[in-house]
Amino acid sequence: IEDVGEAPYKLDRMLQQFRLSGLLSRIKGLVIGTFTNCEGDEDEVDYDLGYEALRYMEENRDPELLEPFVCYVPTGHG
């Protein structure tokens, strides 16, 4: 997962869709790339969307599953 110039609420919607559709229970692993120009609110100076995506996935995955998560992989957009 990676993106350029998307608002955090749109990425949250995408992650929610993954969770609600059951996709997260069917994957073997997840690579989280970079999120370039994906800004948080103006008062969130240190907003890190990659970290937020990783935290979200960790909190919402099935604890019975052992799928790996890798974050900040330079896969093309960043």
Image (spheres, rainbow, N blue to C red):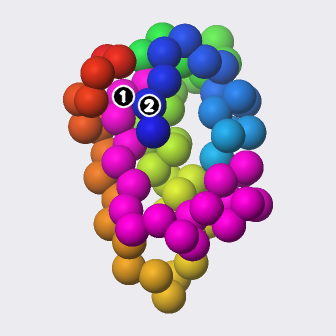
Residue at (56, 78) in percent of width and height: 62
The amino acid type found where label 2 is placed reads Glu
* Start-end of magenta stretch: 16-35
Q: Is residue 27 shown above or below 10?
A: below
The amino acid type found where label 1 is placed reads Thr
Residue at (67, 40) in percent of width and height: 14
Observer able to see residue 19: yes
Residue at (36, 28) in percent of width and height: 34
* Residue nearest the viewer, comparing 1 with 51: 1
Q: Position of residue 3 (x, y in %)?
A: 48, 24
Q: Which residue is mark 2?
A: 2
**Is residue 6 covered in magenta?**
no
The C terminus - image quarter: top left
Q: Is residue 68 shown above or below 9?
A: below
Q: Position of residue 27 (x, y in %)?
A: 47, 65
The N terminus - image quarter: top left
Q: Earlier in the sequence, mark 2 or mark 1?
A: 2
Q: Which residue is mark 1?
A: 34
Residue at (64, 33) in percent of width and height: 11
